[in-house]
Image: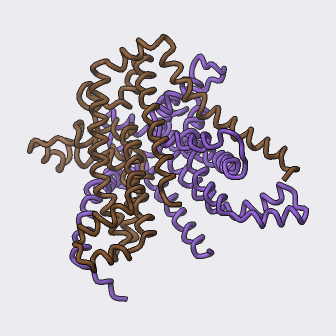
Chain colours: A purple, B brown
Amino acid sequence: MPLPRVDKGTALGVGVTVLWLSLLVLIPLGAVAWRAGENGMGDFWDAVTTPEAAAAIKLTVAASAVVAIVNVVMGTLIAWVLVRDDFPGKGFVDAMIDLPFALPTIVAGLVLLAIYGANSPLGIELAYTQAGVVVALLFVTLPFVVRTVQPVLQELDKEMEEAAASLGASNFAIFRRVVLPNLIPAIFAGTALAFARAISEFGATVLISGNLPFKTQVAAVHIFGQIETDNTTGAAAVATVLLFIALLVLLALDLLQRWVARRA
Amino acid sequence: MRRNWKARWVLRLVALMYLTFLLVIPVGLVFWRTFENGVQPAIDALTNDSVLHAFRVTIIVALWTVLLNTVFGVTAAILLVRHRFPGKRLLSAIIDLPLAVSPVVVGLALILVYGRFSPVGGFLQDNGFQVIFALPGMVLATVFVSLPLVVREVAPVLEEVGVDQEQAAWTLGASRFQAFRRVTLPAIKWALGYGIVLTLARALGEFGAVAVVSGRLVDKTQTVTLVVDQSFQNFDQTTAYTASMALALIAIVILVVINLLRRKQPA
């Protein structure tokens, strides 16, 4: 197949766009991978398997996995309540879901510390614990699953559910057999985005985690510490691992979306 | 529907409890903590010279970010929707990439290329242009993290409105620029507004990337989010909570605007 003819205006636009993306995104990210690998794979491996780095990466992946699972359940549940339920103040609750996107992450960390920190007014102290890290990540990832599932649920035909109900199916059976199969692609997409976000989060976790190596230090906070102590090679190595995980998640998401598009 | 009411109530209760403990109480408590000792300490904290300077820096960075990402976003959206060229899918993927990169990694990436000890950064600095630990680096970092927001709002609307009206304008003798200003721009204005507001929110609140590239120089490169972090670490809770409250208020205003704009957009 011959390449499509590209007119001069398009070529100029693409050229400028690619130049800008290269200077801003591609060359800098390439420099991270380069710095991580410039002394060979052996050094890269040593840098990501120092006890502190390995512990940070493990905690980050584990906490993000927990956050992803909680989001699957709570995100779907909240989306269902917002679409199928009706109660006074629903519009307000709906608008509130986006607050974690609008609120600066450091403020999110501080507000959670205000309630779940030392002298917690509720008597629940999560500061400097792994549970605190999970709560901070749940806060910043709240909108992802809700906002991907909600529109799909809105479009869903209620007739199938009513037919199932008239045939005597229980609520749970209707949800599992009729509603859920339609929501699964959206739930996965939202969860993938939430997971990618949780893996890379810094601002929300930096205060509540207390930055304790081997206990509550997540990967992004570890990288920040390495940059501050001028160990850019170590920082770049862990950063490369994060980039790699994020790329895998994005790739999985892209494959999923293409698969769904083909099936439709 | 009658037999559903129990399940319905349980689900509603679970959803609202979750949101109460995760969102409402924490955010509400910040307002309460800010005004715990009255209004005066909060006003004093906000009108402190360093805090005012941080607000000025934040606004400058945010405005540059919005300007650059608006120009880039509209250009990229038009290219992706209206033009054919090889490598389009790849370009589209690269534009989405920044959302998956940790802000700290963004900062590290920019330091490695534009820092004083790299060939590029060293060359720029020798010619009197400092990027890292200065405003240009902070703008670059903030542009990076908010890169896809305008494109992803504008592109679907451009797709939706099609090319008929633009072609009609060209047939009637309008130049490309005239057609863009009179036909395309009015069609995408709400989506563009939405993208700009999202970019603004992200820019005002960026912390991780800016924390790395700014060097956190008080009264020079400190932004409001950095003030929150620094005053908290220094046990200056009043300033930390007051600055947080100000940022939370801005976030709430932005939420309201977002909801208004969403209603303006054709479903």
Quarter of the N terminus of chain A within the rendering: bottom left
Q: Quadrant of residue B52?
A: top left
> In the image, residue B123 lies at what x, y percent?
12, 47
Q: Residue at x 62, y 18 (%)?
A: A121
Q: Nearer the viewer, residue A83 or A218?
A: A83
**Does A183 sit left or right of B169 as displayed?**
right
**Does B69 sit left or right of A74 as displayed?**
left
The mark total stands at 0
Q: Quadrant of residue B214?
A: top left
Q: Farthest residue toward the front?
A: B172
Q: Farthest residue toward the left?
A: B127
Q: Nearer the viewer, residue B254 or B76?
A: B254
> In the image, residue A188 lies at what x, y percent?
61, 58
Q: Residue at x 50, y 60 (%)?
A: B266
Residue B1 seen by the camera:
yes
Residue A150 in the image: above or below residue A162:
above
> In the image, residue B196 lies at what x, y percent?
37, 49
Q: Residue at x 46, y 31 (%)?
A: B248
Q: Farthest residue toward the right?
A: A168
**Does B197 sit left or right of A71 as displayed?**
left
Quarter of the C terminus of chain A within the rendering: bottom right
Residue A37 seen by the camera:
no
**Does A84 sit left or right of A214 as displayed?**
right
> In the image, residue A116 lies at what x, y percent?
59, 25
Q: Quadrant of residue B162?
A: bottom left
